[in-house]
Image (spheres, helix red, strand yellow):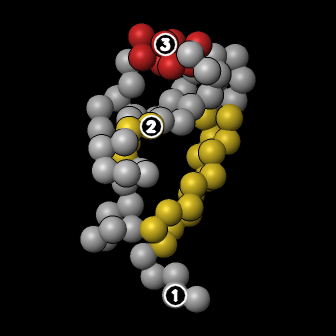
């Protein structure tokens, strides 16, 4: 198995913490990860790089976006 260009990370979020928007699946498909307002969360990511890049970081998620996305689930 060739693992060059692959990466893994474990990120722990304190209550209310979240990542910035980023692209993963299809081009321009944005998503985010984060904890609920009252509970911590651990996210384990495994990804492959494309042209030496693992992720396209975008703008930070606003409090309004977090509240809307969290309650829409």
Task: Where is residue 62? Give x, y as percent.
Answer: 38, 18
Q: Residue at x 34, y 29 (%)?
A: 60
Instruction: Inspect this view and state whether residue 8 appears.
Output: yes
Q: Which mark is residue 31?
A: 2
Q: Residue at x 48, y 72 (%)?
A: 6
Task: Check the image and name the residue furthest to the front.
Answer: 26
* Residue 12 horizontal side relative to residue 49, left or right: right
- Classed neighbour count for the residue bearing mark 1: other residues with Cα under 10 Å, few (<14), some (14–19), many (≥20): few
- What is the secondary structure assignment of the residue under circle 1? loop
For the residues labelled 1 and 2, say whether their Cβ atoms are less than 8 Å apart. no
Q: Which mark is residue 68?
A: 3
Real-space CA distance between mark 3 and mark 1, rounded to the nearest whole angstrom: 41 Å
Task: Where is residue 33? Give x, y as percent.
Answer: 53, 36
Image quadrant holding the C terminus, namely top right
- Classed neighbour count for the residue bearing mark 3: other residues with Cα under 10 Å, few (<14), some (14–19), many (≥20): few
Task: Where is residue 70? Give x, y as percent.
Answer: 57, 18
Q: Residue at x 45, y 68 (%)?
A: 48
Relative to 21, residue 10 above or below = below
Q: Which picture quadrant has residue 42?
A: top right
Relative to 30, residue 67 above or below = above
Image quadrant holding the N terminus, namely bottom right
Q: Which mark is residue 2?
A: 1
């Amino acid at each position: 198995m060739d693992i060059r260009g692959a990466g893994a990370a474990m990120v722990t979020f304190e209550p209310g913490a979240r990542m910035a928007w980023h692209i993963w699946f299809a081009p321009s498909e944005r998503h985010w990860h984060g904890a609920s307002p009252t509970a911590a969360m651990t996210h384990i990511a495994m990804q492959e790089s494309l042209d030496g890049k693992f992720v396209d970081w975008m703008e930070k998620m606003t409090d309004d976006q977090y509240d809307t996305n969290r309650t829409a689930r």
